[in-house]
Amino acid sequence: MRVLLSAYACEPDRGSEQEIGWQRALHMQAIADEIWVLTRANNQDAIEANPLSHSSKLHFIYYDLPKWVLKLKKQSWFFPVYLILWQWGAYRYAARCHHVKPFDAVYHITFASIQSGSFMGRLGIPFTIGPIAGGERAPFRLRRSMPIRGQVSELLRDLRILLLRYSPFARLAYAAAGRIFVTTTDSLWLVSPKWRSKTAVQLAVAMDDHAVQRKEQPPELPRFVFAGNLLHLKGVHLAIRALAQVIVTIPQATLTVLGDGPAENWLRAVAMRSGVTHAVKFAGRVPRQQLVNSFADYTALVFPSLHDTGGMVVLEALSQGLPVVCLDLGGPGIIVNETCGIVVSTADADEDQTVAGIANAMISLGTMPVTEAARLSKGAIARANELSWASLTERVAAHQG
């Protein structure tokens, strides 16, 4: 079987979208005889420098738009147009390759969104979309304490979600697809009811199949960590406010914030207003492997994101045996269960109730007996292994039609 993967983002050791493209390409080798990955030209150096890219089954082909278009790409107003142009150009390139030696199936992998469409269905072979995301949104009741900038950003996202449902490019792709995968039930709304029969929910992120039980014992003093971009939507302000309640019961508890972003100054102000500046450490961004290795130093990852579609850092934490506290929203709410952490319910809850739920989860993990902590750590490893790239790839490929 000769398959084509349309992966705009595909690059090793970068995480996020790039990791999705890279891992799906690698693990497709267990299923297909020949894999051709169509990706951006600027990914070439990193891909070819990685020994795993030189498999006899795996072939990378590179496409990009003319230089004058790439210059315009830097303008925010042009970027959505650029993405559509890239998808169209990629299809034209793929059609020429298909004419020389036909493919048996094609997959649209990244972006893990369909906002710019995909024209690969025009090749006339079985076409699978996703998993794609984009329908997740922060509940209005959990936006109250965001600054105006954050609230406006969320309202604009609401508008984009509405437009995405009726995007002609997305609808053309849905009509041509034999199977559509969306990351969460929220993103099902993006697909018109007439195509729901061929749509299923499947996470877009996964882990390598080598998670092992961590040797280190959890720290004696509760040390919590958040890792990710410092954006309003990540809910770090809720974790900081929760910490103020936690230290009433556990005075030694701390929260380390790993990452940077436009919300950092605001988050520092939240810590000051909450009276926990002494217990919150803003440690900045760290390299990915250093981040993963550091998880052994903490009691739990606190990741109260309001609408993360995936949550790769959640899987990375679980792979190191680190329990996770998250909200029942987006990808993290699907990844985490009672065997590996605590999912805080947001159903009909306002911000204060949600903060209290996060605080109670942190207290529970921070005062947990060693035997119970060991059980959660083992559960985290098992959950990470369950959500592997191999199993994800197999599930998506099994429905190719």
Image (cartoon, grey):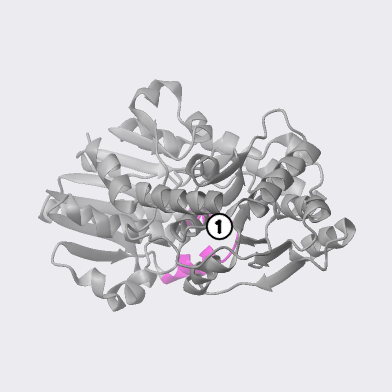
Q: Is residue 90 visible?
A: no
Check residue 74 for magenta coloring.
yes
Label the magenta part by its dominant secondary structure.
helix
Q: Is residue 235 shown left or right of residue 245? A: left
Q: Is residue 343 visible?
A: yes
Please state the extent of the stretch shown in magenta in the rendering: 67-82
Residue at the location (76% across, 63% down)?
A: 252
Q: Is residue 49 shown left or right of residue 139? A: left
Q: Position of residue 260 (x, y in %)?
A: 66, 68
Circle 1 residues within 10 Å: few <14, some 14–19, many ≥20: some
Residue at the location (46% across, 46% down)?
A: 113
Q: State the residue position of label 1.
A: 78
Report which quarter residue 267 is drawn in.
Answer: bottom right
Nearer to the camera, 130 or 177: 130
The type of residue carrying mark 1 is Phe
| Secondary structure at numbered mark 1 | loop
Residue at the location (61% across, 48% down)?
A: 325
Q: Position of residue 163 (x, y in %)?
A: 57, 36
Q: Position of residue 300 (x, y in %)?
A: 60, 56
Asked if 18 appears above or below 128 in the picture, the reply is below
Check residue 277 for magenta coloring.
no
